[in-house]
Image: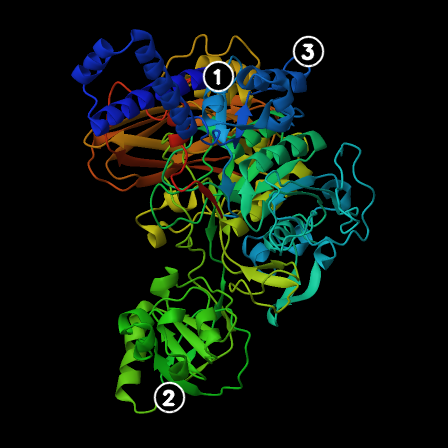
Amino acid sequence: MNEVINCNICLFSISIYIWSLLINNTGLRLNIITSYLNQTKIKMAKQLLLSLLYLLFFSASVLHCQSKPKEKKLYIVYMGDKPKGNMLVGSLHHSMIETVIGSKKSVKDSLIYSYRKSFNGFVAKLSDEEAKRISGMDGVISVLPDRVLKLHTTRSWDFVGLKDEYSVGDSKGGDVIIGMLDTGIWPESASFSDKGFGPPPSKWKGKCHSTNKTFTCNNKIIGARYYNIKNLYDKTDIVSPRDSIGHGTHTASTAAGRQVEGASYFGLAKGVARGGAPNARLAVYKVCWAYGCSSADILAAFDDAIADGVDILSVSLGGGAFEPVEYFEDPIAIGSYHAMKMGILTSVSAGNEGPYRGSVTNYSPWLLTVAANSIDRKFVSQLVLGNGQIIPGVAINPFNRNQTSFPLIWGGDAANYSANANSLESRYCNRNGMDSEKLKGKIVLCENVIDGSSIMSVDGAGVIISSAVSGDDIVAYPFPLPSTIIKAKDVATVLDYIRSTQNPIATIQSSETWKDLTAPVVATFSSRGPNILNPDILKPDLTAPGVDIIAAWSPVAPSSIYYEDVRTTKYYLESGTSMSCPHVSGAAAYVKAAHPTWSPAAIKSALMTTATIVDPEKHKEDREFGYGSGLLNPVKAIDPGLIFNASETDYIAFLCKQGYNTTTLRLLTGDRSVCKSAKHGRGWDLNYPSFSLPIQDGNEINGIFTRTVTNVGSPNSTYVASIDPLERVKVKVDPPELTFNSVGEERSFTVKVKGEKITQLPIISGSITWNDGVHSVRTPLVIYTVLPPKSSSSKQFRPQAKESMSKRSSIFHKNGLWSRN
C-alpha cells in the first residue's frame, strides 16, 4: 500500500513539473489561457486541459512506475528457543512471511531455510522494508542480513605436554564426537582411518551427505553434511563434504587425527602426525567454500550439529575485528549459546587481527576463545651472500638447489619504464611494475610481496622478503619458489652488499628445523584483548600452538600460499588462530572423555585454570590480552582440583544485569520469569575463571568479584589462596581458605580490589591461585584503563528490542566480511 501511495505522489509531482515546463516553453501564460477561454467555448477548453493532464500522467507513469522492484536479499530471522508444545514451526515461519509479503504464492519463493531442530528461526529473501517489518513482530529477537565469513601436528602436542602415552583409549575416547564447522574434509587421508574403531555411539543421530557417491563416511568420520544457501560454486569447489581448500582437513586432523608415521611437508617437519584426541569421532559440517562462509549456513550447521549429538564443536572462523557485534546479532554466538544449553562446548579462534588491541573476536562468555602462540620449533632458511655473510630468515622452503648461487637484484633496480613504473613501485615487486628481462634467473629482494607469484611469473630464481611485510619474524610461510623472510634491519645489509658489488650473488638454503628457545610467544597476527563488547569478561581465554602447525591436507588444495600452486601434498604447514582453536577442541575432547558428565563451563574452567604460565616479560604491553589464562596444558586439565561451573541460568542472569532487553531474554529462554529481580550493574559476579577490571581513566581502582568453586579433586581438602603482588593495588580474598568434605561440594568467595587513581595504564596484571598441596587453581586478574562513555544516558553496546533495521545493520562490520582465523 505504501508503495502505491508513494507512486501516486510522485506521479502528481512529475505531472505538475512537466505542466510548468510546457507553460514556460510555449509561452502559455495564465492571461493567454484566460483570453482563450473568453474567445472560445468553455467546454472545448476543458477538453483541451483534460487531454493535457492525461498526457502528463501517462508520461509520469512511464518515468516512475516502470522502475525496478525493490531488491530482495537473504535475511536471517532469529527467534530464540524452540517453541514449547506441538507448535508447527514451519507454519509459523510461513505465516510471518505471508503477513509482510501479502501473498501465499510468494512465500514458497521467499522462505529458504527453517531452523527448527535446536533453536527457532528462518532464512528468507526479503526487501529491507519487509525485513524491518518482521523485526517488529512479536517473538523476533533479531533480523540479520546474511554475511559472508572467510575462514579465520608432529610437534605441537608434545610441546603442550600431551605425549602419546596420554592418549585416551577407545573405551572412552571413541564415545566423544567433535563437530567441525569448516571447509569439509578429505576422508581418504591416513589421519582419518577407522582401523580398530567400532560402530558410532548410540547417541549419534547424524547423517553422511554426498552427491553421486563422491564422499563416504567411516567409523572415524561418522557424519558429514554440506551447506551452500547461496548456491555459489567456484570451479575448484566440490559439491559434497569433500574439502578442496585444505583448511577443514587441517583443523580436523589437528583436533582428532590418527597417528601417522612419516608425515611431512615435502620432507620438512618429518615425524608422527597426530591429533589431541586421536580416538575421538569426527562429524563434519562444510559451511565454507571458495567465496567464503555464509552466516545462514553456519547457523544451519549449528542447528544440525546440536541435534546430531556432538560433544564438542570446533569453529575456526569468525567476524571482523574492532567493532562490537551484540551476542544475539552474531551467528556463532547464537549457535554456540544453544549448544551450551545442550551441554556442548564450542571452541573458537580469537582472530588474526593482531597485534592491535581490542581486535579479539568471538568474545561471548559461553565460548572458549583461543589465541595462537609459537612452539619450540622454527623453520630457518638462511640467506648466504656472495661475500660470505649469512643472514638467518624464516621460511618453509623445501627447495634444494644444492647450494647453487644466483645473481642477486633489488626489485627497485628493475622498474618497467615502458609500463610507466618507477623504482618506488618495482621495489615492492608488483608484477606490472617490473622489467622481466632484468629479473629472469635472479634472486630478488622485495620490500613487499604477497605470495611470490610475481617473481615466478618472470622466471625468477628466488625471493627475499622483509619481515616488515609479514609483520612477524617467528612465522614461516610456504612459498612456491625458494624464499626466505629476513628481519627488517637485515634488509639494509643486503642492499649495501648489492650496491657495493659489481656482480652480487646469493644462495637461499633449504629450510632447517631449529630449536626455538623463546617459545611460547604469542604470534603477532593473533588478535588481542580487551573485550570491546563487555570489558568485564577477559578475552582471549587461553593460548595454544598456532604457528607452523603440520597436519593433514587436501591433495587438490594449493600446496603453498600461492593460490595456483599445482604441487600436491598430503600434509601442510599452516599458521593462524584457526590452527590453535582445534588444539583446544582436541584437548576439550580429551577432558570430556575422562569426565563425560562435566558441563561446557566445567571443561572450559579446567583448561583455563591449569594453563601453563606465560612469561609476561615477552608480552609487556599486552600480557593477558594476548594469552588469557596461559598456555594450554591438557594433561593437568584432567585433574584441576576445583572448577568454576556455570549454566544457562548464570549466563542469563549476567545478561539481565548488563541491561539486555527482558523481552528478548524471555524469548531466548522460554521462561517468563527471567530478569524479574535483576539490577543493572557490572558483570563481576558471573562465575568466570578469570577477573577483568576496567577502570574509567582517572578514577580509583575499585571492584568486588564473587565466585563459586566446585570440588572435583580430593574429597577432604583445604585450599589456601595466594595472590601475585600487583603494583598500586591491594587485593583481598575472603575467605582466604576453603575447606571441602566431599566431591561436588561448593564454596564461595569474594575478591576485593582497591587502589589509587590510574591514568593511561595499558594493563596491570596478576593472579589468584588456590592450592591444596596437590592442585594449583590459577585465575588471572587484569586491571586497565578505559575512556569514559560518550554519553552517560546511553548504555554501552546494549541492544533494545524492535530497534530500527538501519541501527541493527550498523552493528555489523563495515566491510561486511568475516575472516578466517
| Picture layout, residue 589 above or below residue 91 | below
Numbered circle sitting on residue 664: 1
Q: Residue shown at 23%/28% (left/top)?
A: 26
Q: Is residue 258 left or right of residue 122?
A: right
Is residue 82 visible in the rendered image? The answer is no
The type of residue carrying mark 2 is: Gly
Where does label 3 land, which residue? 85
Which numbered disc, 3 or 2, marks the residue that appears first in the sequence?
A: 3
Task: Determine the image quadrant of residue 552.
Answer: bottom right
Residue under numbered circle 2? 386
Distance between mark 3 and mark 2 Cα atoms: 79 Å
| Residue 749 visible, this orientation | yes
Q: Secondary structure at mark 1?
A: helix
Q: Position of residue 609 (x, y in %)?
A: 49, 38
SS for dot 3: loop
- Separation of disc 3 and disc 1 at Cα? 20 Å
Quick one: label 3, few (<14), some, or many (20+) residues within 10 Å? few
Q: Out of 682 and 325, give the one closest to the viewer.
A: 325
Provide the secondary structure element on which disc 2 rests: loop
Query: Which of the marked residues, 3 or 1, is nearer the chain's N terminus?
Result: 3
Q: How many marks?
A: 3
Quick one: label 1 or label 2, which is nearer the N terminus? Answer: 2
Q: Is mark 3 in CB contact (under 8 Å) with mark 1? A: no
Please state if 389 lies on the left or on the right of 400 as rendered: left
Mark 1 crowd level (few <14, some 14–19, many ≥20, 10 Å Cα): many
Q: Amino acid at mark 3?
A: Gly
Quadrant for residue 83, please give it.
top right
Q: Position of residue 575 (x, y in %)?
A: 50, 57
Residue depicted at 56% across the width and 11% down the height? 671
Closest to the observer, 115 or 672:
115
Q: Position of residue 244 (x, y in %)?
A: 64, 55
The residue positioned 64% from the left and 49% from the top of the image is 252
